[in-house]
Image (spheres, rainbow, N blue to C red):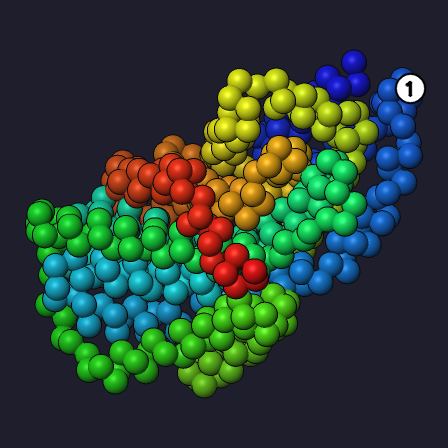
Amino acid sequence: MAEYASLMLFASVFLLLLMGYPVALTLAGTSLLAAAVGIATGHFDLVFLYATPNRVFGIMTNQTLIAVPLFVLMGIILEKSKIAEDLLDAMTRSFGALPGGLGFAVCMVGMLMAASTGIVGATVVTMGLMSLPTMLKAGYHPSLATGTICATGTLGQIIPPSIALVLLGDVIASAYQQAQLSIGIFNPRSISVGDLFAGAIIPGFILVALYSLLVVLTAVFKPELAPPTKLPTVKLNQLLFSAMPPLLLIVTVLGSILLGMATPTEAAGVGALGAFLLALGKGTFNTDKLRSTLQATTQTTSMVFFILIGASLFSLVFRGYGGDELVQSLFNDMPGGVFGATCVVMVVIFLLGFILDFIEITFVVVPIVGPILMAMGVDPVWLGIMIAINLQTSFLTPPFGFALFYLRGAVGDQVKTSDIYIGVIPFILIQLLLLVFLAWQPWIATWLPSQLYN
């Protein structure tokens, strides 16, 4: 009976989120209410809630999670200082005269924006406001223009240093230790956010290359959809002057993590300071922008940690009702074994991505299914990268993809909603193809971490 109560708890949270209630309050309030009912009826042991203070203290003192506000601060500074706008202008003038050159420039700038901000909403909105008017004025078809912007905007999910990978890495690390303890390994091997960063580099660059190839091939075979621009070109030194500062900042932050010279938190601190110095050097960052940047960073960080505390309560109550044992038994009895269980999890995460944000899925779903899959032998780095790309795909999928809503709200009536929906379809197919390829060749995600960290 208690096991089915855990499923009712999950369903209740899911329905309340669909109704639009705040995520953190829904997770915490529903879990506490379910625990109270269980204690009153004798189906829930109060001992499970005794761990709550330790969980909250652990969240607030987690060294990895301290990187979140610092990476958010770095991204917002780069966004508000207009550094990305200068880079897009220089890239557009450099490649715009080539077939698909403007679309290629958008892909490159989107990749750098994704690596610097790490927040999908901010990247999609910024890229939409900056590049869509230029692409439409140059004669690009609205579907190709919006599809390119949405797809490159979601690269913040997979290209490090990504907020999504920081959060997912922390959850995967905890789940992996739990999985090893469950199978009798009492000196568990750990993974880090750096492992996930390294594992995401090759798949992330493959996505960027395929996006760019799609735009170029479209321009070659259907030039009317992506005509060359007639903007005056820039000199090489002008391009380097615009591209080198943010590129050096990203390489420094990511390189220090991958080479083991700094933890993600230390590298995030360097990145935030570097972004601030770049903004000061550009001369467009004043007191008002600093105030709004700090406010936006505080709001985003508070939201993340509030959700994490609520998710911890949910996890304790779900486990107290035996929900983890029920899920494990369902996975063990599933046809196809590990492959079948993994496929089901991927489909569920893909569908949940239509209606839940990646933070909610990371903190609610992954702690439930992650330990079970990894106890069955699934590689933690591969699983983390598959989940990240899966969530990125769900951001794009009509009719509920978050990236589509972000762009729709940012660009107003410049394009039709149908153009946005049609435009993302080729990019969704590319991402699904990459997921299948990763399932067939897991080494794409696991090779680089194994080389860097032995």
The spot of residue 163 in percent (x, y) is: 55, 56
Above or below for 182 versus 410: above
Which residue is at the front of the view, 279 or 198?
A: 198
The quarter in which the C terminus is drawn is bottom right
Question: So how many labels did they put on this image?
Answer: 1
Which residue is at the front of the view, 273 or 283?
A: 273
Above or below for 45 versus 299: above
Identify which residue is drawn at 36% across, 40% down: 437
Q: Which residue is mark 1?
A: 42
In the figure, is residue 89 to the left or right of 200?
left
The spot of residue 259 in percent (x, y) is: 54, 70
In the figure, is residue 60 to the left or right of 38?
left
Q: Is residue 289 visible?
A: no
Q: Amino acid at mark 1?
A: Gly
Which residue is at the front of the view, 269 or 345?
A: 345
The quarter in which the N terminus is drawn is top right
Which residue is at the front of the view, 27 or 326?
A: 326
In the figure, is residue 410 to the left or right of 143?
right
Identify which residue is drawn at 73% across, 17% down: 4
Identify which residue is drawn at 41% across, 63% down: 113
Q: Is residue 353 visible?
A: yes
User: Circle 1: is it few (<14), some (14-19), or many (20+) Cα within 10 Å?
Assistant: few
Identify which residue is drawn at 79% across, 54% down: 58
The spot of residue 210 in percent (x, y) is: 28, 50
Above or below for 132 versus 88: above
Q: Secondary structure at mark 1?
A: loop
Which image quarter: residue 42?
top right
